[in-house]
Amino acid sequence: MKFFIDTANLKEIQEAYDLGVLDGVTTNPSLMAKEGITGKANVIAHYKAICDIVDGDVSAEVISTDLEGMLKEASELIEIDDKIVVKVPMIKDGIKAIKALSDRGIRTNCTLVFSAGQALLAAKAGATYVSPFIGRLDDISMDGMELIEQIVGIYQNYGFTTEVLAASVRHPVHLLKCAELGADVVTCPLSVITSLLKHPLTDIGLEKFLADYKKANQ
Ligand code: E4P
């Protein structure tokens, strides 16, 4: 399973990279705005800075909602670095854009996916990744995990190569459930990855080992 970090914060990306388990980064316009990155030149420079840290795929989202605009943005984004994956929203022109880009060998991430039907369309259009948003479904009392299970099953039935990139992952249980269900990738905040480190018995056990060592070596 690949671990992507869902942020545009360079410090967090560097920290996740230094941990040695980072496979990629996803961003979105809200995450870029949160870091105060505005204006085309700054946005491009920021994507470049992310690509310089990470050894893996970096999803950069288009802002346009029409086919022509999305294709134009995609051609600019892929110029930044080979690591860039063009993130395209799940709308009619988005599906057309994914098809056109995939026909040209350009990698895409179909975002804002909330149903199995949408995921099926994205795979048929040739998306490299499909991003079902688990947390946002849970927020409206639906079961995000059920959607992951459905998509993984459908893709397996037909041998689609589109990777299931579980997004809007809010806590470690989300991540672990995705692993059990066979999602190819999770993207989440750094805190979700580092929370996997923690167990009280590890802390208690380490404290005892070190105390025993100290006693024996006095
Ligand atoms: C996915 O690519 C999105 O950037 C992200 O996972 C959305 O998560 P949120 O629902 O926590 O904003």
Image: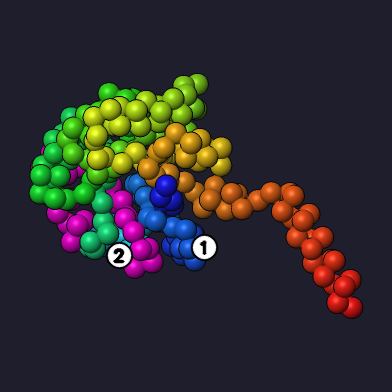
Nearer to the camera, 97 or 153: 153
Checking the image for residue 48, the label placed there is 2
Mark toward the start of the polypeptide (1 vs 2): 1
The nearer-to-camera label among 1 and 2 is: 1
Distance from mark 1 CB to nearest ligand 1 atom below 8 Å: no
Q: Position of residue 151 (x, y in %)?
A: 34, 29
Distance from mark 2 CB to nearest ligand 1 atom below 8 Å: no
| Magenta-highlighted residues | 52-79
Give the residue at x 57% y 53%: 194
Q: Position of residue 179 (x, y in %)?
A: 47, 40
Q: Position of residue 20 (x, y in %)?
A: 48, 63
Quadrant of residue 160 within the rendered picture: top left
Residue 69 seen from this side: no
Give the residue at x 56% y 42%: 172
In the picture, which quadrant includes the C terminus?
bottom right
Instruction: Pick out the residue farthest to the front.
Output: 216
Element class at badge 2: helix
Q: Is residue 206 left or right of residue 24?
A: right
- Scheme of image coloration: rainbow
* Mark 1 touches mark 2? (CB < 8 Å): no
Residue 64 falls inside the magenta stretch = yes
Give the residue at x 37% y 43%: 184
Nearer to the camera, 87 or 150: 150
Which residue is the site of mark 1?
19
Nearer to the camera, 116 or 67: 116
Which amino acid type is marked by label 2?
Lys
Residue 63 falls inside the magenta stretch = yes
Q: Position of residue 128 (x, y in %)?
A: 24, 44
Q: Is residue 206 above or below residue 122?
A: below
Q: Is residue 180 above or below residue 15?
A: above
